[in-house]
Amino acid sequence: MNYGWFNEDTSEQEFSRTVIHEFGHALGCVHEHQSPNAFIDWDRDAVYAEFALQGWSSSDVDNNIFNRYTAAATEESLFDINSIMMYFFPGRLVKSNVGSPVNYVLSVTDKAMINTIYPFQTRNAGSWSTLSDRPWYPPVSLNAKQIDFSPHTQLYSANATWVEFEDAAHEYQTGTFDTQSIHPWKKPQKKNSERIKFKRGVYDDTPNVVVWLSGFDMATGHNWRIKVYADGIDKDGFTIHLDTWADTVLYAAQASWIAYPKENQGVSRITSGSDDTSKYRPWYPAQEKNGRKISFKESLFDKVPKVFAALNYLDFDSAKNMRIKASTPQVTTDGFTWHGDTWEDSLCYGVGVSWIAFG
Ligand SMILES: [Zn+2]
C-alpha cells in the first residue's frame, strides 16, 4: 500500500479515496482501467508525458495504465468508471477528451462485485442459559426467552442455543415438528413421525437435513428416552421421527430442523452431522461425561468455524433428576469435541447431538 504522500494536511476525502483503493488491492482487486472490459481511447503520448513528470518509465506506464488483464485471469464486472479502483484521468489523456471522475467511495458495482467474491456472513449461532438471569435454585416453571415448562415440572436451570440464517437465503429452510399435531398428549405414542415438504423447487438434489430436540414431556416412573432423526430425505422433503422405546411414556415432544443444499458444503463452508453415545458405547453403565471428537473434511475451514450443537437423543434414569448440558468447548479448523455431560447423581445412559459448523 502506498500512503507516501499523506500528511497532517491531507483531506478526509483524500484519505477515503486512497485508503479504500489500497484496501481494494489488499483484497485482490486490480485497477479498473486495466479491466478486460476497459476500452479507453488513450492519447498514449500524452499519458507517457504526464506520468514521466512523476518519474514513471514507459514500461511503468504500460504496466500500470495501458496493459489490460485477460478475462481468464480475473473475475470482472462491466467496466465501471465510478469504481474506487479507477484512476483519475484528466480529459487531456484521452482522445475523446472525456476523463474519469475522482472517485472517493465504493461504487454500487464495487459493492456488488466484492460481495460475490467475499459473501457476507449471513449465518450466526450462540447460546443462552437461565443461569445468566437467575440462580439454579429455587426452580421456576416460566423462563424468559422461550424455555417454558408446564407448572408441575421443576426446572432448575436450562440452556438454549440458537442459529440464524438470512431471510433471503431461501435455500436454507427451517421448521418445527410437534407430536401434538398428530395426536393429543393424553394419548402417548412411542413412534411419532410426519412427512415434511420443502418449498417447491428450492432443491434440485437431495439437501442435507439437520434435526434436533426442542422440547419434550415424559412421565415419571419410567426412564426418559427420546430420539429425533430424519430419513427418506429427497429433494421434495423428508420424514421426521420423534420416538421413544422400552417402557417410556412420551406425552409430547417438539423438534426443529434445517435443510440446506449439499453443494453448499464446499463453496459456502458449511457442514453438519449427528452423533450419539450408542455409536461408540453400550447404554449400560451410565456415564457422567459423554461425547467424542468429530473431524471435519480436510481443509474445509481455513478459520475456526462457529459450531451450533443441540441435543437429538436422551436416555436417562428417572430415579434421579435429569441434568444434561450439550456443548462444544474446543473447536479448531480440523474439528471439535462434543460433550453431553451430566453432574451430581444423574444417570445418563445415552445422549447425542446434532451439529452445524460454518465459517
Ligand atoms: Zn492502485
Image: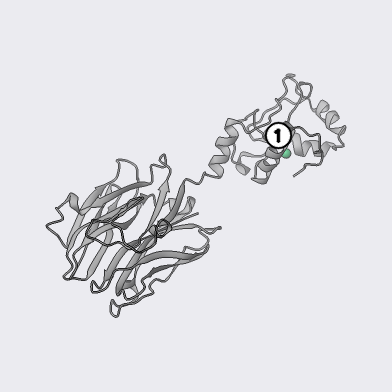
Q: Nearer the viewer, residue 159 or 203?
A: 159
Q: Position of residue 180 (x, y in %)?
A: 18, 52
User: Which quadrant, please, contains the N terminus?
Assistant: top right
Ligand 1's quadrant: top right
Q: Which residue is at 29% across, 68% downward?
A: 322
Question: What residue occupies the far top of the structure in this picture?
Answer: 97
Q: Position of residue 119 (x, y in %)?
A: 52, 44
Q: Amino acid at mark 1?
A: Arg
Q: Secondary structure at mark 1?
A: helix
Callout 1 crowding tier (Cα within 10 Å): few <14, some 14–19, many ≥20: some
Q: Is residue 198 above or below residue 138?
A: above
Choose top left, top right, bottom left or bottom right for residue 91. Answer: top right
Q: Nearer the viewer, residue 85 or 59?
A: 85
Q: Which residue is at 87% across, 32% downward?
A: 53
Choose top left, top right, bottom left or bottom right for residue 84. Answer: top right
Q: Position of residue 176 (x, y in %)?
A: 28, 50
* Disc 1 target residue: 17
Scheme by which the image is coloured = one colour
Question: What residue occupies the far left of the structure in this picture?
Answer: 187
Left or right: residue 219 versus residue 74 is left
Left or right: residue 144 versus residue 184 is right
Left or right: residue 135 versus residue 359 is left
Q: Position of residue 239 (x, y in %)?
A: 24, 54
Choose top left, top right, bottom left or bottom right for residue 226. Answer: bottom left
